[in-house]
Amino acid sequence: MNDILALFLGIGTILIFATVVGFILKIKTKQPNPMINNLNARIYAWWVMVAIIGVAFWFGNTAVVALFLLVSALALREFITITPTNQNDYYALLFAFYVVLPVQYIFVFAKWYGMFSIFIPVYVFLLLPILSSLQADVKNFLGRCAKTQWGVMISIYCISCVPALLMLQIEGFEGKNMLLIAFLIIVVQISDVLQYVFGKLFGKHKIAPALSPSKTIEGFALGTLSASLVGGCLWWITPFAFWQAIVISLILTLLGFLGGLVMSAIKRDKGVKDWGYMIEGHGGILDRFDSVCFAAPIFFHIVRFWWA
């Protein structure tokens, strides 16, 4: 608990500094500046998110699992809203929301790794098309099934890998697994932030203009390297050595970046800018967790294979 408290005090200090800087920039800028306004909106949203996660950490593992169950539910709702199916997929969607979602998190809470790891990728992936096929509607059947399957995979399975870190038993790290969740989220989120900042300051070459016009090669390179060093400096909250924390952080930042591109491709295909409007300055839940979705499963299995 002392390590968690020290970590959140450090995060709070950084946010206070960022808030002061944002306030000064807003005062000194005579004309409205979209970049500064966006930055201040993001800082405010980070305060809210850090507070929510901090409260969940304070109340313990059950609260953390419940929080991410809610995140998964909201993320799945956003995904299905942006990628609509039709009325003949009603039972598949009903099954996803009211069976798959709670059952997956029951496995997380019960620390049942076997069922947690195969329930969605095997059983649910096979059952969802069966439920849709029973309606005998063949129009765009493959596309509709893919939307439901990937909505469940990204919104439930991938996000559930974050609280699943609590189930790992690591020698010499007992009772500190929440710090692994903090490490994952901090590294991935700080990478997104630094890529954005460095891209605005030094970006000249677009890395994927058709998918994410704001991402640049300069921002990507400087952001991932800087975030990896930040992750290395956080080795003390993990069971990793300093160099291991850097390597793992680099993997997380790369996966987060690529995951962001995939999720941006889906949005561009559907003609929308954000997944939702729940978080001011950040869009929807999936706009904040797109990078985490792709990094979390790999991080979970790296830690489980090498340390648990």
Image (cartoon, grey):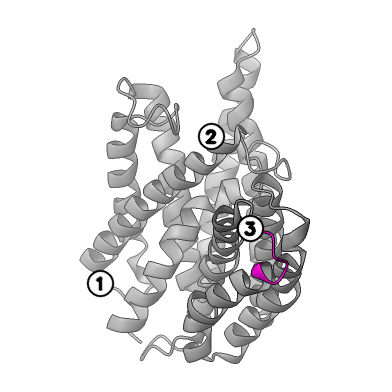
Q: Residue placed farthest to the left in the image?
A: 243
Asked whether 4 or 296 is in front, the reply is 296
Give me the disc on residue 99. Answer: none
Residue at (42% x, 55% y) in the render: 187
Mark 3 element type: loop
Residues drawn in magenta: 133-138
The quadrant where residue 125 appears: bottom right
Q: In which quarter of the image is residue 282?
A: top right
Secondary structure beneath label 1: loop
Residue 188 visible within the image: yes
The C terminus - image quarter: bottom left
- Residue on which the image places disc 1: 241
Q: Look at the numbered discs 2 and 1 and tell me whether their residues touch, using CB distance below 8 Å.
A: no
Per the rendering, the mark at residue 268 is 2
Q: Nearer the viewer, residue 251 or 276?
A: 276
Q: How many labels does the image show?
A: 3
Residue density around tag 2, few if under 14, some if 14–19, many if 20 or more, within 10 Å: some
Q: Is residue 246 above or below residue 157?
A: above
Q: In this view, does 140 lie to the left or right of 204?
A: right
Between the C-alphas of marks 3 and 1, the distance is 54 Å
Which x, y percent locates residue 222? 29, 37
> Which of pointers 2 and 1 lies earlier in the amino acid sequence?
1
For label 3, count other residues whose C-alpha is less than 10 Å away and answer few (under 14), some (14-19) or many (20+): few
Whether residue 237 is visible, yes or no, is no
Amino acid type indicated by mark 3: Val
Amino acid type, mark 1: Ala
Q: Name the residue under label 3.
A: 138
The relative height of residue 265 versus residue 157 in the rendered view (above or below) is above
The rendered magenta stretch, by its main secondary structure, is classed as: loop
